[in-house]
């Protein structure tokens, strides 16, 4: 893991989160967090760039205040919405076989992937390398500095909607920030929440967000499939509100404080609650088990939709089972309900970082974690793929706050020259639990 200061941006349907982390001596510390209600986003898609930019700015400012860092650029997550994942094979010739393979030849390879392998209605987001071949010699991870007449690349491309990517880039830039990298969120998540063996042998991950739920299958250390269900924690809140005829605020409170995703868990402690009802002066008594049934019904519907998608590709045969994360995964009983429906081993991932031990922050943390672990070849390929007026591909030197100064130091999200002094002393009391 490369030492430095990293700032990430997770643009969710219901909330926008920013994480500032310091990696020092191979250890990652979260030193600043921002979370702001999403405006201008519907079903995972940015529909109002200016509103989204304003929400991004507010979230960044919160993270800046807590970390003492002025953020200049961000590692930005791209959701699985309208994503296309395709294996590919391309071949290019080295014009001078005695000349070492260099970055220019890699650019030619990426251009072939972009022009010949990427669907016409999509834009290339990233390339996952399986192996290079040089003059027929296989199993090569990085061909640079080698010599040969012909270079081949076997890999997997990620392509997304041109509109989706443009709106993400434009919103970040309109908020006043540059982008140091764009990373596919399920790919980043797999790196954080799965062990190397789980990624290699095959595991399913389900991200239970506020406005939507994404599921992806990982095998051979690559995301092979991803799908989205346009339902999440926000739908559960609305269900409680409608069924109980109570306000959304009350419904959200009930979900967080007494909600269960698996009604069987309320059998022993089925307490009666008094809730405010719209149009009535008094309160109405409701059993915890009844609220659990409402929550369970929605989550079961989400899981059953995912089950149909994953059954089609045989994902449940993967030995790693399922890992749940995302804000809605914090509801007690989600794991038990998932095991009942999917009939495979299920576990829940909760980040283990001070101030962000909540699954709703998994995406934002995963982006930082992935960038800090990224090898030089992957960084180069990302820069080639994403190079545009929106992307900052060179790092800025990091500067820390002087001990007696109130001025903030403007830093990039990916710094290679960070000072060795730890920011851990700057960690403040960061807020209570967040749901997406």
Image (cartoon, rainbow, N blue to C red):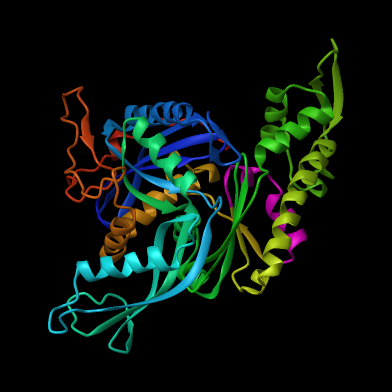
As displayed, is residue 394 above or below residue 239?
Answer: below
As displayed, is residue 20 above or below residue 309?
Answer: above
Residue plotted at (15% across, 78% down): 100
In this view, the residue farthest toward the bottom is 136
Residue plotted at (69% across, 45% down): 332
Residue 236 in the image: x percent, y percent? 72, 38
- The reply to whether the magenta stretch includes residue 342 is yes
Quadrant the N terminus occupies: bottom left
Foreground of the two, 13 or 68 = 13
Location of residue 173 by image quarter: top left
Foreground of the two, 195 or 288 = 195
Location of residue 380 by image quarter: bottom left
Residue 95 in the image: x percent, y percent? 18, 79
Residue 146 in the image: x percent, y percent? 19, 81
As displayed, is residue 387 above or below residue 252?
Answer: below
- The reply to whether the magenta stretch includes residue 334 is yes
Location of residue 406 by image quarter: top left
Quadrant the C terminus occupies: top right
Residue 334 in the image: x percent, y percent? 69, 50
Foreground of the two, 319 or 127 = 127
Magenta residues, start to end: 325-343
Residue plotted at (45% across, 73% down): 88
In this view, the residue farthest toward the left is 98
Q: How many marks?
A: 0
Please identify the dominant SS of the magenta region: helix
């Amino acid at each position: 893991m490369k030492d430095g200061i990293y700032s990430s941006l997770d643009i969710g349907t219901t909330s926008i989160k920013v994480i500032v982390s310091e990696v020092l001596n191979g250890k990652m510390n979260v030193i600043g967090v921002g979370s702001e209600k999403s405006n201008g986003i519907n079903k995972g898609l940015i529909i109002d760039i200016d509103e989204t930019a304003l929400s991004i700015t507010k979230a960044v400012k919160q993270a800046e205040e807590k970390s003492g860092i002025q953020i200049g650029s961000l590692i930005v997550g791209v959701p699985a919405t309208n994503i296309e994942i395709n294996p590919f094979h391309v071949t290019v010739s080295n014009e001078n076989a005695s000349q070492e393979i260099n970055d220019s030849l890699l650019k030619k390879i990426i251009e072939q992937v972009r022009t010949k392998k990427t669907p016409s209605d999509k834009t290339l987001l990233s390339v996952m390398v399986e192996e290079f071949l040089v003059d027929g010699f296989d199993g090569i991870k990085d061909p640079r500095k080698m010599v040969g007449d012909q270079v081949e690349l076997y890999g997997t491309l990620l392509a997304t909607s041109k509109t989706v990517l443009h709106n993400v880039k434009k919103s970040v830039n309109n908020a006043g920030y540059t982008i140091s990298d764009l990373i596919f969120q399920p790919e980043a998540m797999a790196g954080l929440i799965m062990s190397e063996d789980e990624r290699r042998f095959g595991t399913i991950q389900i991200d239970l967000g506020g406005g939507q739920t994404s599921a992806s299958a990982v095998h051979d250390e690559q995301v092979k499939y991803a799908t989205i269900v346009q339902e999440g924690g926000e739908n559960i809140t609305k269900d409680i509100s409608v069924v109980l005829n109570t306000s959304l605020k009350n419904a959200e409170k009930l979900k967080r404080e007494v909600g269960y995703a698996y009604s069987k868990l309320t059998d022993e402690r089925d307490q009666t609650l008094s809730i405010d009802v719209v149009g009535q002066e008094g309160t109405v008594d409701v059993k915890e088990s009844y609220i659990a049934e409402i929550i369970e019904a929605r989550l079961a519907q989400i899981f059953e939709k995912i089950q149909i998608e994953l059954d089609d590709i045989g994902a449940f045969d993967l030995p790693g089972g399922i890992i749940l994360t995302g804000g809605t995964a914090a509801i007690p009983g989600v794991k038990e309900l998932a095991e009942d429906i999917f009939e495979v081993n299920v576990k829940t991932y909760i980040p283990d970082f001070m101030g962000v031990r909540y699954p709703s922050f998994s995406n934002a943390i995963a982006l930082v974690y992935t960038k800090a672990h990224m090898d030089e070849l992957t960084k180069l390929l990302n820069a080639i793929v994403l190079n545009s007026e929106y992307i900052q591909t060179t790092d800025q030197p990091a500067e820390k706050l002087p001990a007696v100064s109130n001025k903030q130091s403007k830093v990039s999200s990916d710094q290679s020259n960070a000072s060795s002094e730890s920011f851990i002393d700057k960690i403040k009391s960061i807020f209570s639990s967040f749901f997406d």
